[in-house]
């Protein structure tokens, strides 16, 4: 049965659901760094430890790193709005103006993120106008103990975490 849900209404109403914001980063075989901002990131499995994110099928940033088999996730803090914006754009060397470290596994990690996850690509599955990219976690580490960046209803509300 065909859906009667309007895609614009779906997008608008799903925007009420808050999400975290991450930077997916990778280094290609020529040493060039690639990255993109993602708001659709989730944990998937504990055995094995799997995470996933959903880049758009037509994302230039994702397509530049699609063949890379290892990637990193840097979970942004609420204070990293400029980084979020920089990686949301197409083109340019996004890492050039952003403080980062290259891990022992060869992945770019955004400095001062609240969490870093490094993965080997597990699978890529088509999901409508997006892809589900799953990664098997190889390394996970806590970063700064600040509030996470939250995206909801087109903005970035502050999350107050009690002590």
Image: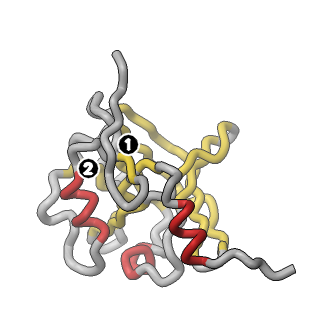
Q: Locate residue 112, reporting x and y percent.
A: 22, 40
Q: Residue furthest top?
A: 163
The foreground one among 128 and 34 is: 128
Query: In the rendered view, would you say 60 is above or below 51?
Result: below
Q: Nearer the viewer, residue 75 or 18?
A: 18
Residue 61 sits in quarter: bottom left
| Left or right: residue 69 compared with residue 80 | right
Give the structural element (helix, strand or loop) at label 2: strand
* Residue ID at (50%, 64%): 69
Image location (x, y in percent) of residue 141: 39, 34
First in sequence: mark 1 vs mark 2: 2
Left or right, 32 with respect to 48, comes to left
> Label 2 belongs to which residue?
110
Give me the residue at 39% from left, 79% from top. 64
Q: Are marks 1 and 2 in contact (CB under 8 Å)?
A: yes
Residue 91 x %, y %: 26, 80
Q: Quadrant of the N terminus?
A: bottom right
The colouring scheme, among rainbow, by chain, secondary structure or one colour, is: secondary structure
Q: Is residue 66 left or right of residue 97?
A: right
- Determine which of the numbered discs, if any, sits on residue 116 in the image: 1
Q: Against 129, is 39 above or below?
A: above
Tell me the element at label 1: strand
Q: Which mark is residue 4?
A: none
Which residue lies most toward the right here? 1
Mark 1: few/some/many CA within 10 Å (<14, 14-19, 20+): many
Q: Residues within 10 Å of mark 2 (few under 14, many from 20)?
A: many
Which quarter of the image is occupied by the C terminus? top left
Asked whether residue 104 is in view, the answer is no
For marks 1 and 2, give the CA distance.
8 Å
Q: Position of residue 125 (x, y in %)?
A: 66, 70
* x 42%, y 61%: residue: 38
Q: Is residue 1 left or right of residue 130?
A: right
């Amino acid at each position: 049965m065909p859906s009667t849900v309007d895609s614009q209404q779906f997008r608008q109403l799903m925007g009420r659901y808050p999400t975290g914001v991450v930077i997916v980063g990778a280094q290609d075989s020529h040493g060039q760094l690639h990255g993109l901002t993602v708001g659709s990131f989730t944990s998937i499995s504990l055995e094995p430890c799997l995470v996933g994110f959903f880049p758009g099928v037509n994302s230039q940033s994702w397509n530049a790193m699609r063949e890379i088999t290892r990637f990193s996730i840097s979970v942004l803090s609420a204070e990293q709005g400029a980084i979020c914006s920089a990686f949301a754009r197409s083109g340019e060397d996004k890492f050039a103006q952003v403080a980062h470290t290259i891990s022992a596994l060869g992945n770019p990690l955004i400095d001062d993120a609240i969490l870093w996850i490094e993965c080997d690509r597990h699978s890529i599955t088509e999901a409508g106008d997006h892809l589900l990219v799953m990664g098997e976690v190889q390394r996970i580490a806590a970063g700064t103990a600040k509030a996470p960046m939250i995206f909801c209803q087109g903005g970035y509300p502050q999350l107050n975490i009690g002590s």
